[in-house]
Amino acid sequence: MTATLLIDRAVIRLSPLDDVEDLRGFLQGLVTNDVSGALPVWAALLTPQGKVLFDFMVWAEGVDLLIDCEADQAEALVKRLSLYRLRRKIAIATDPALGVHWQPGDGPVPDPRLAALGQRWIGYAEGDSVTEAWRAHRLSLGVCEGHVELADLLWLECNAAELNGVSFTKGCYVGQENTARMNWRQKINRRLVVVPLGESDAKRQRAAYADLGLAVDHLRVEDIRPEWMPQWMQSAPAG
């Protein structure tokens, strides 16, 4: 069996408990991306100020929605979504039978952020881990994700617009006002960028990966060297 399992990811299942319950409408008013159309999409749940609480993928499975998220943040995300559920008849819980899978290369289910990230899908939680290979691959492409790298930063500073993580036409969601204002002004002062570990700024470092010789820094745009910018970032708005 080919190793494809990302053991640091978990799946949260949202299920309607009433035939008239609108799961997509529930998430649509909460998350940064448009979940009313084709899935999967990359999205985030933000604070009212527009800072990242959680980032994740949203998938469809029949009438249910599946959220592909960090395993160590899954229960916290379930609790946060449950707070917003109020009296709506929606079941929200992790699904331990399911896992997130990945393999490099082209195929039918490209990562919605960037096709070069490879293929991603949800299946049974079985098989050997490719978590370390996935981390090396995404960092080689300059893509950041997860609580350690993104938490408490403004969503557009996490390169969300360039990596298809936000819709500017879908309407209101938590943190939308500040996110939309930044986009309208086309003014992003800082960005996350993957840099050589030996050239990382300790004061601006979010994460360090000694085994890869890389770090994730949160830098002012004018301090980002051209050689650190992946191709997908090169047309991004300057500060």
Image (cartoon, rainbow, N blue to C red):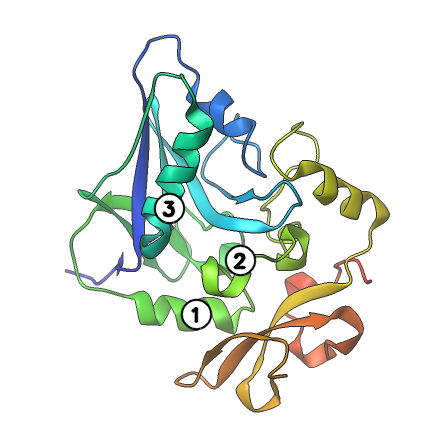
- Does residue 28 appear anywhere in the picture? yes
Asked if labels 2 and 3 touch by Cβ distance under 8 angstroms, the answer is no
Residue beneath the point at 67% across and 58% down: 157
Residue at the outermost top position: 20
Disc nearest the viewer among 3 and 1: 3
Location of mark 3 (residue): 76
Looking at the picture, tell me which residue is in the foreground, 230 or 205: 205
Mark 1 → mark 2, Cα distance in angstroms: 21 Å
- Does residue 37 appear anywhere in the picture? no
Which quadrant is the N terminus positioned in?
bottom left
Q: Secondary structure at mark 3?
A: helix
Q: Is the residue marked by circle 1 packed among few (<14), some (14-19), or many (20+) residues within 10 Å? A: some
Asked if labels 2 and 1 touch by Cβ distance under 8 angstroms, the answer is no
Residue at the outermost right position: 185
Query: Could you tell me residue 16's position as x and y percent?
Result: 33, 19
Query: Could you tell me residue 63's position as x and y percent?
Result: 34, 21
Location of mark 1 (residue): 137
For the residue marked with disc 2, what is the amino acid? Answer: Ala
Location of mark 2 (residue): 151
Q: Secondary structure at mark 1?
A: helix
Residue beneath the point at 43% across and 31% down: 83
Q: Is the residue marked by circle 3 packed among few (<14), some (14-19), or many (20+) residues within 10 Å? A: few
Q: Return the disc, 3 or 1, that comes first in the chain's sequence.
A: 3
Query: Could you tell me residue 124's position as x and y percent?
Result: 19, 45
Residue 131 position (above or below residue 19): below
